[in-house]
Image (spheres, rainbow, N blue to C red):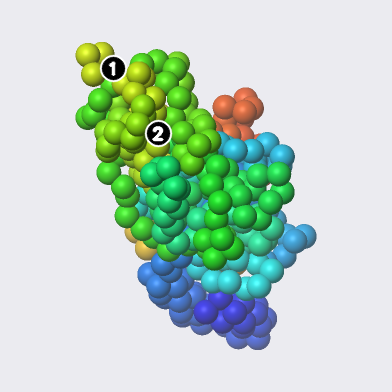
Amino acid sequence: MGEFLFLEDALIHHLRQWTTIALIPLVSLLSVAAFAEESEESTEYVLLYRDAALHEAPDAEGRTHRAFAANREAASAAGVPRLLARVVADHGRWVEIEPAYHYTSICGAQEFLQGAGVTLRFFVARTDLAATVRRPVRVRHDDGTSVELQPGIPLETVDGRRDRYLVFDEDLRFEVELSSEDVGHVFAAAGDFESRWLDGTPTKPGSDFFLGGESVGIGESDRARTVEVVREVGDQYLVSLNRACTKLVVAVDATDLDPSREVFAYGSCCAQSGTIRGYGFAGPTYLAESGTPVYWPGGDLAGVTTRAMRFGASTEDRLTTFCMSTVIVDNALHEGALPDEDQTVHFCLRDVDPDLVEP
């Protein structure tokens, strides 16, 4: 379908040269219909490094955007949220994506362009896709401990090995051995585990948890927390630690359980959801209804609005266009005084009815 859109863009270019402008809206409607169809059919997701280049077209030299400044070492570090996107089409070197909203479980990823009121289409290089668990996985150890992982959890290799990975989900950090079939870059949606912060048996501050004999890192380890006791094994207990995408059965020393302790239950969340700040233009405005196609400044179809949006007028080269500018993710604002040009996307309307323009 994506290749059809590329051919269609070329057709539009020739139509503009050789026929009347009256035919353009019909071709635009065909593009929008194809856009909507692809969005509805998409059921696969990817995680992007947060400094991934978001291209308006499958062209390395074309216009690009970034949610965060280019720094792959920092972007690939354990615990740094990845960006969550839905796969539209796979073009080999390029993967066509759009932001994914209201996904079943974030799993340590970060939404972008959330609340922008528009679904935009981008192309990303395959090298910008982050490794993730691609299917439900369960790993059991001889000591009775185990881990279950849902698709979409970010992974990082350990010492360059391709069979051992660092998993991070919310406040948990631990290593696990996975097969090549368990790891990939594309995954399907899955349900959540029941995350239990409030119920269970309290532990002493600073308690150590073990998975397969190895320590499990847990945020703010000096705090007491609650666990669900599974069973007693010698001088230890097997207890359950659940997060949205991770279900751990780990070992803890019996002396670290403290049923009499009162624990203030709290949640730790690595799944930051970006909110959007839009910047309009001064002068006349135009109210676009939900489902209105929007275009990149270069003329290619960029996406469609998902709610009614008011666009401001911008006059360039004696032509009046109605456009909008939006920050990709508001976290970028915390890394600098203002979003730079790369961290902002611009999209415009076409074929505006002049009778509906408001001064």
Residue placed furthest toward the bottom: 18
First in sequence: mark 2 or mark 1?
Answer: 2
Q: Quadrant of the C terminus?
A: top left
Q: What residue is at 35 percent from the left and 31 percent from the top?
A: 234
- Label 1 belongs to which residue? 258
- SS label for mark 1: loop
Q: Quadrant of residue 302?
A: bottom right
Would residue 236 appear left or right of 314 to someone viewing this image? left
- Label 2 belongs to which residue? 251
Q: Is residue 326 visible?
A: no
Would residue 219 appear left or right of 49 to someone viewing this image? left
* Callout 2 amino acid: Ala
| 185 in relation to 146, above or below | below
Q: Closer to the camera, 71 or 5?
A: 71
- SS label for mark 2: strand
Would residue 172 appear left or right of 260 to someone viewing this image? right
Q: What residue is at 69 percent from the left and 58 percent from the top?
A: 127
| 48 in relation to 254, above or below | below
